[in-house]
């Protein structure tokens, strides 16, 4: 039996359309596992929305979307010389190093293709991109060599927040000044992780610029009420205290039931990415979870009788074993139970959209 993502289609599509209507310059992002939906499905949905540009994470993801979406394709990972030389005129290449920009410009001059590029400005995230001085050098290089078509400047900002919703505003304003100082003819800025307030204020302060928000999570997963994840009960076994079970021969801590449900490590169940714990409360929760781990008790994402239940042992590849204490109503084989997952790290067996 599968691990299923069920989607209230009308509600989900309404959310997509509302967000698109609110942000006419929206650039949907599809990358990785397609936020649980799959890259191909989201590419078709971007085509349905009628946007002019779709963003993917890597060059390896292009084949999944290029036949299902007809507009421009922005690759978020910066181009490097070990990537194929540009050929598809629909692709916009992110560039963040002078040597890479030079290579693309030379290729454009010799081939006559003029690759489309987005010049990435280094932000406080410090992942990729030009410094202010390098961006000026890039502007001079483009003016001197030609060979490329500059489609804008990209800003990938961290996930900062503030009560006023303006955590990034001053930084973006500095970067806009850098674009002007670089002598670039473009007035298009590709942005990530800006708030509604910031986008509105930037539009007012820089009416001659076009800010293109690249949005993934809040687009595809923005209305969580439209999404429901369900696992299927595969088996149930009553155990007494001391009974052994599982691959590792663990002993039942008390009377209860071993419940076997669909969903395991092959789906992403039980796999957790590191998180930055910023508050004392969240750090205390991490300590508490660590104590449970040390005792061999780990909370699962599966919800039975209104509570997230403990794993009886680490999840298997395609199924998980849960421990239900005595007194908890045991669901029948074939019934479904809810499951809380991280959509960007979960591969579903089925996606059902009504």
Image (cartoon, grey):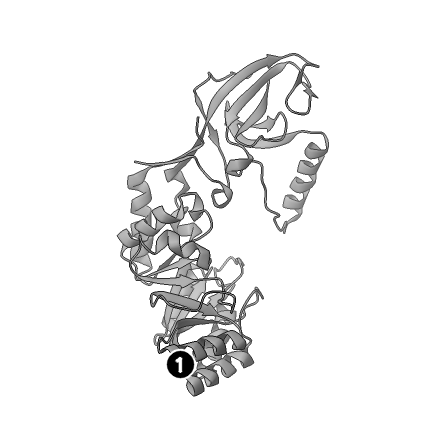
> What quarter of the picture does the C terminus occupy?
top left
Task: Identify whether 176 is placed above or below 242.
Answer: below
Q: How many marks are shown on the rendered structure?
A: 1
Residue at 31% x, 50% y is 44
> What quarter of the picture does the N terminus occupy?
top left
Let me know if residue 17 appears in the view.
yes
Nearer to me, 66 or 283:
66
Residue at 41% x, 46% y is 221
Residue 95, horizontal then vertical, whole percent: 48, 71
Q: Quadrant of residue 37?
A: top left
Q: Quadrant of residue 324?
A: top right
Dot 1 crowding, Cα within 10 Å, few <14, some 14–19, many 20+: some
Residue 131, horizontal then vertical, whole percent: 56, 76
Let me know if residue 200 appears in the view.
no
Q: Secondary structure at mark 1?
A: helix
Residue 88, horizontal then vertical, whole percent: 35, 65
Horizontal side of 75 relative to 12 (left or right) equals right
Task: Identify whether 327 is placed above or below 122.
Answer: above
- Residue picked out by circle 1: 109
* Residue, far bottom: 144
Horizontal side of 234 relative to 54 (left or right) equals right
Residue at 43% x, 20% y is 335
Nearer to me, 115 or 281:
115
Task: Identify whether 278 is placed above or below 95.
Answer: above
Nearer to me, 95 or 190:
95
* Residue, far front: 110
Residue 181, horizontal then vertical, whole percent: 47, 83
Horizontal side of 161 relative to 8 (left or right) equals right
């Amino acid at each position: 039996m599968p691990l299923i993502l069920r989607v209230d289609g009308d509600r989900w599509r309404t959310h997509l359309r509302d967000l698109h209507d609110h942000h006419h310059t929206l650039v949907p992002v599809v990358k990785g596992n397609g936020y649980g939906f799959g890259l191909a499905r989201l590419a078709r949905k971007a085509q349905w929305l009628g946007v002019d540009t779709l963003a993917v994470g890597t060059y390896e993801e292009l084949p999944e979307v290029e036949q299902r979406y007809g507009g421009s394709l922005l690759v978020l990972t910066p181009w490097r010389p070990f990537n194929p030389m540009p050929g598809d005129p629909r692709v916009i290449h992110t560039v963040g190093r002078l040597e890479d920009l030079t290579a693309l410009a030379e290729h454009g001059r010799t081939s006559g293709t003029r690759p489309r590029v987005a010049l990435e400005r280094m932000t406080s995230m410090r992942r990729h991109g030009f410094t202010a001085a390098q961006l000026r050098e890039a502007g001079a290089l483009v003016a001197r060599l030609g060979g490329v078509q500059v489609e804008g400047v990209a800003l990938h900002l961290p996930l900062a927040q503030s009560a006023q919703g303006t955590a990034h505003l001053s930084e973006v304003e500095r970067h806009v000044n850098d674009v002007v100082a670089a002598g670039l003819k473009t007035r298009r800025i590709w942005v990530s992780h800006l708030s509604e307030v910031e986008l509105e204020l930037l539009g007012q302060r820089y009416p001659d610029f076009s800010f293109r928000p690249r949005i993934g999570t809040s687009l595809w997963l923005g209305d969580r009420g439209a999404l429901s994840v369900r696992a299927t009960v595969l088996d149930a076994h009553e155990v007494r205290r001391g009974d052994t079970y599982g691959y590792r021969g663990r002993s039942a801590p008390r009377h209860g039931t071993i419940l076997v449900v669909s969903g395991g490590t092959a789906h992403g169940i039980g796999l957790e990415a590191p998180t930055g714990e910023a508050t004392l409360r969240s750090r205390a929760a991490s300590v508490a979870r660590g104590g449970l781990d040390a005792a061999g008790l780990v909370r699962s994402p599966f919800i039975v009788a209104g509570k997230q239940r403990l794993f009886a042992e680490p999840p298997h590849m395609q199924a998980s074993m849960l421990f239900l204490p005595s007194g908890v109503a045991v669901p029948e084989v074939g019934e479904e139970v809810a499951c809380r997952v991280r959509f960007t790290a979960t591969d579903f067996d089925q996606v059902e959209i009504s």
